[in-house]
Image: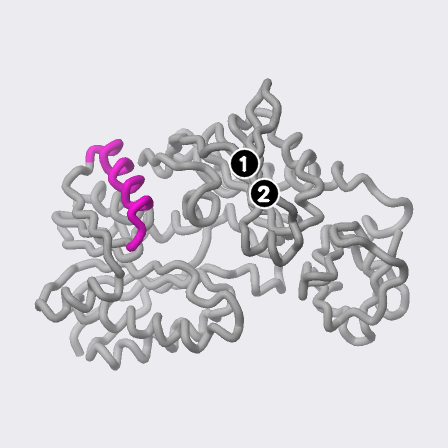
Amino acid sequence: MISVVVKKGRARPLWCGHPWLMSGAVARVEGTPADGDVVRVVDADGRAIGLGFYNAKSQIRVRLLGRAPEATGDEPSIAKLIGARIERALSLRRAVGLPSPQTTGFRVVNAEGDGLPGLTVDRFSNAVVAQVTSLGLWRERAAIRDAFPDANPLVVVAPDDAAEREGIPAPRREVFVPGHAPELDGAPSRTTFFENGLTFVAEPGRGQKTGFFFDQRAARSLVATVANGARVLDLFTHTGAFALYTARAGARDVTAVDSSGPALLLARENAKLNGFESIAWVEDDALRFVMERGRAGDAYDVVIVDPPKLARRDADVDGALDRLRRLVAEAMRVVPNGWLLVSSCSAAISRDALERAVAIATNDAARSAQVVWRGGAGADHPVIAGHTEGDYLKSLFLRVTRP
């Protein structure tokens, strides 16, 4: 097997479990691997660290699949390794009570957190979506399909941005239905699933992420605890999950805002499925909307600020924090005495940076804020110890008052 040798002094993070070998840490490659090939990673003393998918096009030169002893001896079956990792991931979900009669939609495989960098799998009742961002795993998608024989359908998709970085060829979407040949670039299917007893409809593999944001389940439950009798503003509502949780909790008035018309169509359908037809759905830019409400002297008891990824790279962080600070300040101006949830799903934005931005926003808005809860994704989104990049979702739940 081809070996990739790590520079002296650069192997410690890998020995401690970090799943990425960056291009700048590579001393040499012993052999000529093709992009997507499995290689052995060794330290400067020749000790085997692990196996991974190699890609010269990527700054992440090797995405590690396994640690020694998997990296020693004969080349293992990568398909069997993938299947074993998926079964281990399923076992973890079963251990934390997923699925359950109340929750049939959840994260099944959380990429690096489950030892499969470049693979995210979400289940929507019977439907399963596998989002692949690694060329090596794309080549092994038959092993992914074999791990979910009950999926109906199984959608395997490579997002365009990741596919271009990794060199994943088109078509980048396959739909597998039991008893049928795979359909390339198949039309979107629709499915329903439960989350904490609420019914949602999704188009698996379409829209943002895999089709739904399972990572905010804990935050939705928390916000619902203060929603009874409240006036609620849900910014960046996407398909309406926060809005539905607060409506079920007894909110007297719910306004949900998103700039995506297609997302709002699904949100309205979700509301109808659950009998919440009084929610006001607004297609608008969230910042513009909340600024207008502030100028009009409007006030809310609960506001959710859950924007899409604002910083895709380290170079984007400063601008993203400025936008986030402004969003939070404007949201606080319409909360004279109430609750505010602020989330960031940008891995490049640290928890400390998020909290500093919120602190500055409290000054801008002439408010005081107590951090009641610091959180992130749930137990179905595990993160490898030491892989801080995997801890992408950061949330703050705040009690906001006038000084």
* Residue 96 falls left or right of residue 335: right
Q: At x 27% / y 57%, what residue is drawn?
A: 235
Pointer 1 with pointer 2, Cβ within 8 A: yes
Q: Regarding mark 2 in the picture, which secondary structure is present there?
A: loop
What x and y, as percent, mark residue 263?
33, 45
Part of the protein shown in magenta:
259-275
Q: Secondary structure at mark 1?
A: loop
In screen coordinates, is 304 left or right of 402? right
Query: From the viewer's perspective, is residue 354 above or below residue 187?
Result: below
| Image coordinates for residue 351, horizontal then vertical, percent | 45, 70
Vertical side of 377 occupied by 16: above or below: below
Q: How many marks?
A: 2
State yes or no: residue 265 in magenta. Answer: yes
Residue 346 image offset from top left, x and y in percent: 47, 64
Q: How is the image coloured?
A: one colour
The residue where tag 2 is placed is 172
Indicate whether 179 appears above or below 88.
Answer: above
For residue 286, what is the image quadrant? Answer: bottom left
- Label 1 neighbour load within 10 Å: few <14, some 14-19, many 20+: some
Q: Residue at x 49, y 31 (%)?
A: 127
Q: Which quarter of the figure has residue 249?
A: top left
Q: Which mark is residue 199?
A: none
**Residue 268 is a magenta residue:** yes
Is 378 placed left or right of 162 in the picture? Answer: left
Q: What residue do we see at 72% from left, 55% from top?
A: 64
Q: Which residue is mark 1?
A: 185
Q: Residue at x 29, y 47 (%)?
A: 261
